[in-house]
Image: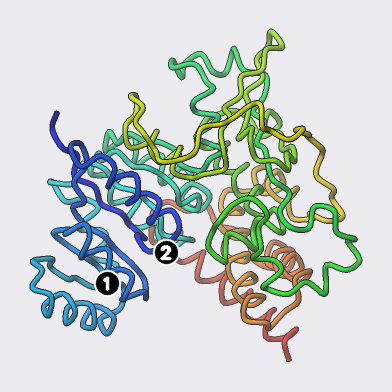
Amino acid sequence: MKKQNLLVLGSTGSIGQSTLDVAARHPERIEVFALSAHTQVDLLWAQCLQHRPRYAVMVSEPHARLLAEKIQAQGLRTQVLSGAVALDELAAHPEVDVVMAGIVGAAGLSSCLAAARAGKRLLLANKEALVVGGEVFLSAVRQGGATLLPIDSEHSAIFQSLPEDASTWSRRVRKLILTASGGPFRQRDPATLKDVTPEQACAHPNWVMGRKISVDSATMMNKALEVIEARYLFGLPPEQIEVLIHPQSIVHSMVQYHDTSVVAQMGVPDMRAPIAYGLAWPERIESGASHLDFTALPPMGFEAPDPRRFPGLPLAWQALAAPTGTAVVLNAANEVAVDAFLNRRIRFDQIHAVNLACLAGVLPKSPGDLGDLLALDAEVRAFAARQVAAWAA
């Protein structure tokens, strides 16, 4: 078996660390070719010590210099690069077979596009590539002949529950059902959400995730973005996509067919399982996650999302029904708003207010390429920053 050369974009994040854990379990089939990080020099250095990649990338030049000094002192042969251009070049590197796209937010879009155009096996943990990239991104996947595999637990579950022949999906599938944990505030009095602290919002009951996605889970904006992503991934109309809260996070998502059958994918809440599936597809390999013990499972329940607690969720269907580019507006607004909340500049409930203000105040433009996407993204971020500044004053 030929080893697969793996590039992990965002290796110091939770997805990146889980990916490296799975890869380390299968040295006979996976070679860590390159790693990238934003600011965590010490953690990336430790990963380089363990996995000995050929390249390591940090976004900023000062961080790259610090990493290079550590690597040189250790006598490693890892070459240190810096900047977004280096990410794009590695994503398209002829020796790279598999790209794990784990960079959070719209910052990961350019390297995802580069990997798609180069025809890589692209493991998509960055939902913004599809939410922001939309048809621009899918066109790059088609033109490059890339293999696009979803890594989000929900989208991986749907992918595993669908027929292998994608041409049959539209006539056989009644609806896709994305499950959501409901986050830490599923039962909290909506009137008290304005008092939520960043620490409370990041305390997810089931999953260990980064701060931004933890807040998105608390608002269920992550699920809104996943609805948009599912629309692009699976090609079904938005009205055939549903969200149900499943607090136990055992059923990761489901597909309901026209004959009333429901096919679901289940497992413990551990991202190593969908990561291992993506790395080995169409085979299956050991992930390191615990096996599901049905005799020990708590009672499982499902419920509809409460719009008072999660007012941002319906914005997904609104964005999909609106002019092209509206999803870009929603995503950029939310990134600015969540960052402002984490830095205690706005209240938890004002995240939704920023998103609404941007959707009302920025006219979406139909993007034709990466430049158009980034220009619209920048326009929305500037508008959102002004909203935040006004409320924070």
Please state the horizontal and vertical placement of residue 278, each as a whole percent of the image: 37, 36
Residue drawn at the location 42% of the way across and 46% of the way down: 136
Relative to 331, is 190 on the left or the right? right
Q: Does residue 169 sit above or below 145 in this rendering?
A: above
Quadrant placement of the C terminus: bottom right
Residue type highlighted by circle 2? Ala
Tally the marks: 2
Examine the image and state in which quarter residue 81 appears: bottom left
Residue on which the image places disc 2: 107
Please state the horizontal and vertical placement of residue 387, each as a whole percent of the image: 69, 79
Residue drawn at the location 54% of the way across and 58% of the way down: 209
Relative to 241, is 98 on the left or the right? left
- Mark 2, Cα crowd under 10 Å, few <14 / some 14-19 / many 20+, is some
Q: Does residue 300 sit above or below 348 in this rendering?
A: above
Residue at the top extreme?
A: 259
Residue on which the image places disc 1: 83
The disc at residue 293 is none
Q: Are marks 2 and 1 in contact (CB under 8 Å)?
A: no
